[in-house]
Each structure stands twice: as C-alpha cells, then as structure tokens.
Amino acid sequence: MTPDDSTPLDTTADPHAISYQSLPPVLAGEQPPQPLLLLPEHAGVSRLSLQYLSGAAALTLLFFASASVTVAYLSDTRPVSAASQTASAAASAGESNFPDVSLTAQSAYVLDLTTNRVLYSKNPEVQLPLASLIKVPLVLAVLEALRPDQNITILPHTTPDGAAVRLPAGLQFSTQELINFTLVASSNEGADILAQAAEDATRIKYPQATPDRAVLWRMNEIAKNLGLTHMFFLNTSGLDLSSTQAGAYGSARDVAVLFGHAASTAPEVFGQTSRDAIKIKASTGETVTAVNTDEALPAIPGTVMGKTGYTTLAGGNLAVVFEAGPAHPIVAVVLHSTQSGRFEDIKRLVEATVASIGSDH
C-alpha cells in the first residue's frame, strides 16, 4: 500500500461548494480563538452527511452562547532536538478520566474546547511522525496566499507517492476545490499541487521565507506562532522521507491545539472533511470524486472536522473535532496506532467522551 490515505475515486457523487472567510493573522503567543459559526451548505447539494449538519447546528449554538471562550494552550518550552524525532512512546500514560479505555495508539489526547479541560491523555508530549495530518497546516498556509476562487491549472506531474494520477494535467480547478479534494481524499497529489501553486504568492507575502520553500516555511511559522514546540514539518505532504526520517513530527497535544485552531478559524473549509464523499468540478466541466478516508466517520456524532494520516513510520493517525453535546466541541487525537486501529481508538475515545460529558449534566 502506498504511504497515503487516498482511495480509488469514482465520478458518481454530487458536487459540493463551500464559502470562505479570511483567516485572521496568527500572532506569536496568541491563543487559538473561540469556535466560530460553521456555515450551512449552499443550494444545489442533493446529499449532505448527518455529521456535517449536526456539527453545523452545534457550532451555531456555540457561536452565540460561548463567544468569549478560547482554547488555552500551555506550551512546553523544551527545545526540540533532532534526536527527539524518534522518541519512544514508552512514557507514562499520564492523566486519564477514561480508566476503562484501552488504545492501540502510542499517544492520544482529548481536549474539551469549551472548558479547556483535558479529558484524556496518553503520552501527550511524545514527538511522533504526523503523516497526512500536516495537510491541515498546509491548507492554512495556502489560504493565506491564494483566493478560494482562484483557478489553478494542473501542470504535467507525477504523484509524490507513486499513486495513480487523479488530477489530469491541463484541467483547471479553483483553490477551494483542490483543498476539498486534498483534505477529503487525503491526497498527496493534491497537496503537492497546492503547495506549488501557492509558492510564489507566499514568497511575495513573506519575503523572509526560505527560497523555493516558502509554503513549507509558512507552515512551520504557523506551528511556532501557535506555541506548538514539538511540531515541525520537513515537507508539505507528511510522506516519509526515508525508512528512518518522517516528513513531519509533533505531539498529540500539539495536534489537538492545531485542529482546534483550524476548526475555529476556517470552519467552512475544514468542515468539508465531515463528508463521506465530495465531487470537485473543473472549469471546463470535468469532475473528480473523492471518498473520505475516515472510516470512523459514521460513528462520530456532530463531526466538525477530521483528518487521517498513515505512513510506515507514522502508523495510523487520526484527529477529529466533534460535538459531544449541544455547543460542546471536543478534539480527540490518536497517534501511532495501526492502519485500522486508529478508527477503533477514536471511536472508543468518542464514546467515552460522550458518556463523560453526559454524566456531568
């Protein structure tokens, strides 16, 4: 299997369109803002996922009821050394309010985004390979550089992971359509196209960026500005660079904060990941369908966003933001599970979270 979450595509799903609101600047030391309204679907969509609809309704309530709530993050200030990249997850499990939950994952974290309460943690600071989870900061960087309606012409290319080409050269897709495809299908091909398309504009916006790697530089700056001291990126896809070197590293707690930030600053963009499938449409009418790689999606109530990740070094990763109750967003992360075990791990954490939240009322 290729080190990617992409699945074979079909051309039967209905097209989906998204709106977009500008991302606020991320300032050094600034805490991720409160969750925002998840915009409803546009007209003309014949099939919506129940997860997307329930998540949208819950975030609407949250927006009005909890406008002053922010996600606090007390960052670990220890420097991240190269040697720590392959740190073992043999540390103690740490805080856990779910004593009966047993996970395959080496690291996990569950954070209540309304109260900033850690509901579960297992080796939350251990630095592990992230795989395709880094497509989230990639999208954040791309959205700063390119308009959502800006057309991108697909150039002749090969895929970075050796998979079949799904986006034929010569077609034009809007930025937002390519983002949808990349996130939902977890496409390394889409990630590569987005990064290349945003490179020049990112370098102009940030003259101090690393030459020819401006998008990658900005991704790392976003992580730094959020205080994610265990997180850094060596490429824009998360693919392993070698048998011993991953393309990105971070801790479960880092990922939780990143996803909370993404869900609150661009909910209508990342909300597309709650769909079981989407279709993107080229300017000349050709369509490509992407099937969601998150097999746990049907079992997660009120999904706001989610992202899978899998490589040989990373094992199975999965992070989700979901509603445990009305206006009650939760972020859950599992790192270094197995390809199938990550879905069972997340389902266990979601089930335990919902039961815990319900018992508090």
Image (tube, grey):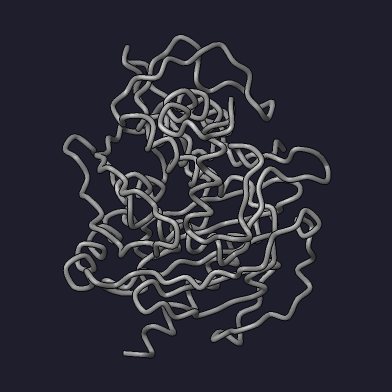
Percent x, y of residue 134: 56, 46
Count the marks: 0
Q: Quadrant of the N terminus?
A: top right
Q: What's the residue at 58%, 32% (across, down)?
A: 210
Q: What's the residue at 56%, 28% (across, down)?
A: 192
Q: Quadrant of the C terminus?
A: bottom left
Q: What's the residue at 76%, 49% (across, down)?
A: 313
Q: Residue furthest bottom?
A: 360
Is 232 on the left or on the right of 17, as rendered? right
Percent x, y of residue 277: 41, 40
Dividing the picture into quarters, in which one does residue 176 lie? top left
Dividing the picture into quarters, in which one does residue 51 lie? bottom left
Is 43 on the left or on the right of 268, as rendered? left
Q: Residue furthest front?
A: 208
Q: Nearer the viewer, residue 216 or 343?
A: 216
Q: In the figure, 192 relative to 105: above or below?
A: above
Q: In the figure, 53 relative to 240: above or below?
A: below
